[in-house]
Image (cartoon, rainbow, N blue to C red):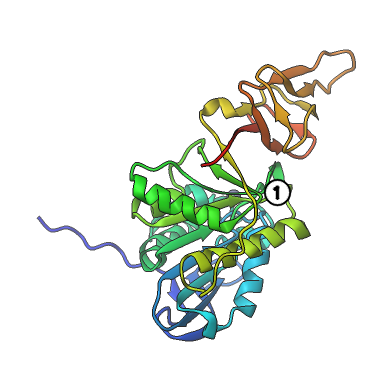
């Protein structure tokens, strides 16, 4: 039986992914629209290659309102000297570029959530075409993938690097060794609410080393969180052997998300009054937050209690919440991984 060959990607890189030296260019994705009949989305990309060695793919802006990754990666692309590199570093600071330009989680073109669109489609939406290009043309080049996230406009996180529990325990150990090398203040064994469609899953299923982060949020980035991202990116390159020196290790606290009991979701709209802040401990049964009805005075707040002993690892922002929103995430502190 004839198997149709996969449709080629419409994305064209304006640089040579296999050339040595420093190149700054774009992934050009045709996008015909009212203000540009034969226009394109131009996603900035940098390739720095020298000698022999592994390839790292570093991505930020997978969600457009998360800023530690873009801040660290625009700077790294500008400053990383090719003489220091053994192998190749592919840097895309703002992967969902239309979303990044709009300052929104999803793309203003198609409302696509890039990290729910993998492995993507070459004949799909703009967001699906970006995912497809990454899946079929960039991930296969990479030995290690670091994809930066933070909370965006509606969540705020303790600063952590993370990997997932994987069926291949050797691969899982390699991922957590890279998380340890990243040296964020916290290191998480992360449980996803829904892992379908994520870049994480696509890379992990190919047996590669994958590291993600949650480094803050609230729709901005601080000097502290950008510093963590910059040190983490170079530490991962050092750990991979692409930069020939030891990672600059800092103390980290290991956290685990053992079950879906870690997540608390709002059941009604209202005004949040958190009773604890990020990084503070809770015991099972403690009140994490009260959510006040805001239509009139006199109403009792709904109380949201911790389902397990742990620490507040993420919280909703800003101050009002809607039914179904993620209110809080708890993590369990571990002595070690
Ligand atoms: Zn994200």
Residue sitting at x 46%, y 66%: 240
Residue 284 rendering spot, x and y as whole percentages: 65, 19
Which residue bears the numbered disc 1?
217
Between 277 and 192, the one nearer to me in the picture: 277
Q: Which quarter of the image is occupied by the N terminus?
A: bottom left
Quarter of the image for residue 134 reads bottom left
Give the residue at x 59% y 78%. Answer: 80
Q: Is residue 66 visible?
A: yes
Tag 1 secondary structure: loop
**Front position in the image: 126 or 38:** 126
- Horizontal and vertical percent for residue 74? 64, 71
Describe residue 136's horizontal placement relative to residue 193 as left or right: left
In this rendering, position of residue 21 left or right of residue 302: left
How crowded pointer 1 is (Cα within 10 Å; few <14, some 14-19, many 20+) is rated as many
Tell me: residue 35, above or below residue 267. Answer: below
Q: Position of residue 232 (x, y in %)?
A: 60, 61
Q: Where is residue 114 in the image (x, y as percent from the top left)?
A: 52, 53
Tally of marks: 1
Identify the residue at horizontal 34%, vertical 41% (top origin): 167
């Amino acid at each position: 039986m004839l198997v149709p060959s996969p449709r080629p990607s419409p994305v064209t890189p304006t640089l040579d992914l296999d050339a040595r030296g420093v190149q700054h260019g774009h992934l050009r994705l045709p996008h015909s629209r009212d203000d540009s009949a034969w226009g394109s989305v131009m996603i900035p990309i940098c390739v720095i290659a020298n000698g022999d060695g592994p390839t790292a793919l570093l991505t930020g802006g997978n969600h457009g309102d998360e800023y530690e990754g873009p801040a660290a990666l625009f700077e790294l692309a500008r400053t990383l000297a090719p003489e220091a590199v053994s192998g190749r570093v592919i840097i895309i600071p703002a992967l969902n570029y239309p979303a990044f330009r709009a300052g929104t989680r999803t793309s203003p073109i198609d409302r696509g959530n890039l990290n729910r669109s993998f492995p993507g489609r070459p004949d799909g939406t703009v967001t699906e075409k970006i995912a497809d290009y990454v899946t079929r043309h960039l991930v296969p080049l990479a030995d290690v993938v670091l994809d930066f996230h933070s909370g965006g406009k509606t969540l705020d996180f303790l600063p952590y690097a993370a990997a997932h529990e994987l069926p291949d325990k050797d691969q899982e150990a390699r991922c957590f060794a890279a998380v340890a090398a990243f040296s964020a203040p916290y290191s998480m064994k992360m449980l996803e609410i829904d892992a379908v469609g994520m870049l994480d899953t696509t890379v992990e299923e190919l047996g590669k080393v994958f590291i993600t982060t949650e480094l803050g949020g609230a729709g901005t980035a601080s000097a502290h969180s950008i510093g963590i991202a910059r040190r983490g990116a170079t530490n991962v390159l050092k750990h991979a052997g692409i930069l020939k020196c030891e990672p600059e290790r800092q103390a980290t606290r290991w956290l685990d998300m053992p079950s879906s009991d870690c997540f608390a979701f709002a059941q009604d709209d209202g005004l949040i009054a958190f009773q604890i802040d990020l990084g503070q401990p809770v015991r099972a049964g403690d009140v994490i937050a009260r959510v006040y009805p805001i239509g009139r005075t006199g109403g009792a707040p709904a109380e949201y209690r911790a389902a397990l002993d742990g620490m507040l690892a993420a919280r909703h922002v800003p101050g009002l919440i809607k039914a179904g929103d993620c209110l809080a995430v708890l993590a369990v502190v571990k002595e070690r991984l």
